[in-house]
Image: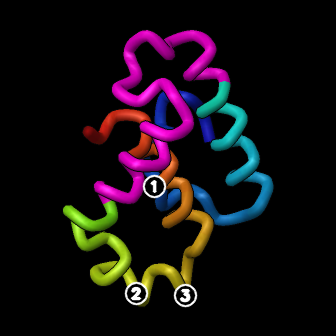
């Protein structure tokens, strides 16, 4: 997985790839945090919750949670970066 294709959450198939994603997300915040919509932990977590509710992510991805839980978690973390 590279930075160029990190938005393709289907690529996360192992704990190692998930760890790479988390490291990329932290690095992205350090470099581009001024472009993130949510720059405090409370706004970040609130945006994840709002995105889950608004998109019905948890309901619509029930089967996906069972097959690829790390992919789903990565998508949640990524949504927290930009969702209002």
Q: Residue at x 57, y 10 (%)?
A: 31
List the residue tagged with mark 1. 75
Cα distance in 3D space between marks 3 and 1? 15 Å
Whether 14 is drawn above or below 32: the answer is: below
The residue carrying pointer 2 sits among few (fewer than 14), some (14 to 19) or many (20 or more) residues within 10 Å by Cα, namely few
Cα distance in 3D space between marks 2 and 3? 7 Å
Q: Tell me if 25 is positioned left or right of 35 in this view.
A: right
Q: Residue furthest right?
A: 16
Whether 28 is drawn above or below 24: the answer is: above
Q: Position of residue 39 (x, y in %)?
A: 48, 24
Tell me, for residue 12, which label it has, or none.
Answer: none
Q: Position of residue 26 (x, y in %)?
A: 65, 29
**Is 47 colored magenta in this rendering?**
yes
Confirm or deny contact between disc 2 and disc 3 (CB under 8 A).
yes
**Is 77 colored magenta in this rendering?**
no
Q: In the structure shown, which secondary structural element does the residue marked by tag 2 occupy?
A: helix
List the residue tagged with mark 3. 66
Q: Position of residue 32 (x, y in %)?
A: 49, 13
Tell me, for residue 62, which label it has, or none.
Answer: 2
Where is residue 81, by image quadrant? top left
Q: Residue furthest left?
A: 54
The residue carrying pointer 3 sits among few (fewer than 14), some (14 to 19) or many (20 or more) residues within 10 Å by Cα, namely few
**Mark sitting earlier along the chain (3/1):** 3
Where is residue 51, by image quadrant? bottom left
Cα distance in 3D space between marks 1 and 2? 14 Å
Which span of residues is magenta-colored?
27-51
Instruction: Using the image as rendered, state which of residue 44 and residue 76 is in the foreground.
Output: 44
Whether 22 is drawn above or below 29: the answer is: below
Q: Tell me if 64 is positioned left or right of 69 in this view.
A: left
The residue carrying pointer 1 sits among few (fewer than 14), some (14 to 19) or many (20 or more) residues within 10 Å by Cα, namely some
On the rendered image, what quadrant is the N terminus found in? top right
Q: Residue at x 34, y 26 (%)?
A: 37
């Amino acid at each position: 997985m590279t930075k160029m294709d990190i938005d393709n959450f289907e690529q996360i198939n192992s704990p190692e790839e998930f760890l790479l994603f988390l490291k990329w997300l932290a690095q992205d915040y350090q470099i581009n945090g001024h472009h993130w919509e949510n720059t405090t932990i409370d706004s970040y977590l609130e945006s994840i919750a709002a995105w889950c509710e608004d998109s019905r992510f948890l309901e619509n991805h029930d089967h996906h949670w069972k097959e690829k839980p790390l992919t789903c978690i990565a998508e949640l973390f990524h949504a927290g970066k930009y969702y209002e």
